[in-house]
Amino acid sequence: AEAMSRATGVPAFLSDVIQGTALLAMLVALLFTAYRIRRVGAQT
């Protein structure tokens, strides 16, 4: 977070928020893709 805040010029807490949001979005996307792959056979 410190390197990101120095590179982008934003405060450290804001870079922590950005990293947390990106991590949550990635985890949600992985859950949705795994759920969709399992349900492919059920949809017609």
Image: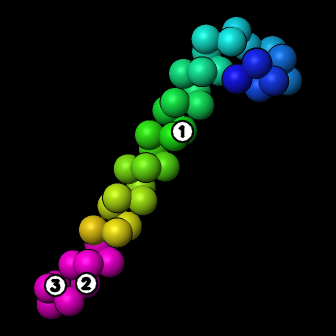
Q: Label 2 amino acid? A: Val
Left or right of 37? Residue 22 is right
Q: Position of residue 5 (x, y in %)?
A: 76, 18
Residue at position x 54%, y 21% in the image: 17
Are the residues at dot 1 and dot 2 in contact (C-beta closer than 8 Å)?
no
Magenta stretch, residue numbers? 36-44
Residue 40 magenta: yes
Distance from Cα at disc 1 to Cα at disc 3: 30 Å
**Count of picture labels:** 3
Distance from Cα at disc 1 to Cα at disc 2: 27 Å
Distance from Cα at disc 2 to Cα at disc 3: 6 Å
Label 1 or label 2, whichever comes before in sequence order: 1
Is residue 8 something that shows in the picture?
A: no
Q: Mark number for residue 22?
A: 1
Can you say whether 34 is above or below 6 in the image? below
Q: Which residue is mark 2?
A: 40
Left or right of 31? Residue 17 is right
Choose top left, top right, bottom left or bottom right for residue 36.
Answer: bottom left
Can you say whether 20 is above or below 26 in the image? above
Is residue 13 something that shows in the picture?
A: yes
Q: Position of residue 7 (x, y in %)?
A: 85, 23
Q: Which residue is mark 3?
A: 43
- Neighbor class of circle 3 (other Cα within 10 Å; few <14, some 14-19, many 20+) is few
